[in-house]
Image (cartoon, grey):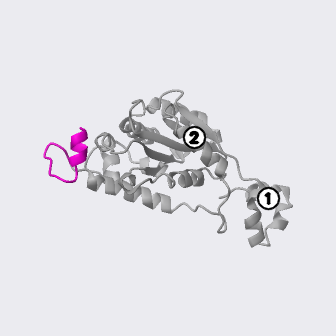
Amino acid sequence: AALVKALSGQHDLNAYADHRADWDQLRRISRALIDEIPVDLAGHHLPRGAELAQIEELLNSPETRAIAVVGESGCGKTVIAKRWLETQAGPPEEAGWNLWWDSATLDAHGKTAFDHALGLTHPLPELFSGVPVPLAYLVLDNADRLLDQAAWENVSRLLGALDLGDETGAWRLIVTCETECWEEVRTQLEAAGVPRGRCIRVEVSSPEPSALSAVLAAHPALPPLFEKPHLRDFLCRPK
């Protein structure tokens, strides 16, 4: 297998499919979804160092196969996941093996429709089992918006392809989810193949008003609104 990986892309190996076109497609999907996510508020990055450091520490542990970034709607879960993932590109030969999917990506009904919607010519287990890097990450954003069983069946196919139960496997999963939906999502993830106890919850809160000082200074109309309690919580939410 190691020899196949070393030669793949350099020689035409009839016994092994060339997955480059499918991986290019997966990267296009991921890039399009990531590019839609704003990472700042009114032109300013909000400080999220504590959350990013916690995610880094957890995913550096061999015991952690998945993490869930959980918090109230609008508190910045998706932005935190994006900022963390974009720090993981690594050297050029390891770039491009990290993926981002959202709930809409998993809405197609049935295995054939799912594969067709992704535009792939090879099955996901075949693609995911051959990543030539020691660690690869897949973000599943807005898991709380997976509304029907067909979508969760696609999640099950996806997680089966990641094979998170393999102690020597490369893949790690990052899920974002609203607090009120987390128990249901956790149950569905366990049914779909995330080993019990191996998905660690990272709790995210809205930024404190003090974290918005640069934004407030740049927009003089905002500080008076912070004096109104019923608006302060709303304004502290990044989206």
Q: In the picture shown, does residue 216 fall above or below 164?
A: below
Residue 29: horizontal and vertical position, in percent? 40, 57
- Is 152 or 14 nearer to us in this picture? 14
Q: Is there any visible trace of residue 147 in the rendered image?
A: no
Q: Quadrant of the C terminus?
A: bottom right
165 and 52: which one is in front? Answer: 52
Cα distance between the residues tagged 2 and 1: 35 Å
* Dot label at residue 57: 2
**Which residue is found at the position 68% from the left and 56% from the top?**
47
In this rendering, would 26 be left or right of 177?
Answer: left
Report whether 223 appears left or right of 162: right
Task: Mark yes or no: residue 31 visible.
Answer: yes
Name the residue nearer the viewer: 78 or 184: 78
Query: Which residue appears farthest toward the front when viewing the image?
Result: 91
Please, what secondary structure does the residue beneath circle 2 have? Answer: helix
Residue for badge 1: 231
* Magenta-tinted stretch: 1-17
Spot occupied by residue 43 in the image (x, y as percentages of width and height): 64, 69
Q: Earlier in the sequence, mark 2 or mark 1?
A: 2
For the stretch drawn in magenta, the main secondary structure is: loop
Residue 211 lies, with reference to residue 133, above or below; the image says below
The answer to if 12 sits in the magenta stretch is: yes
Question: What residue lies at 28% left-to-right and 43% top-to-bottom?
Answer: 123
Q: Nearer the viewer, mark 2 or mark 1?
A: 2
Tell me the amino acid under the disc marked 2.
Glu
Q: Position of residue 209 (x, y in %)?
A: 78, 57
Query: Residue 211: which quarter of the image?
Result: bottom right
Say which quadrant the N terminus sits in: top left
The total number of labels drawn is 2
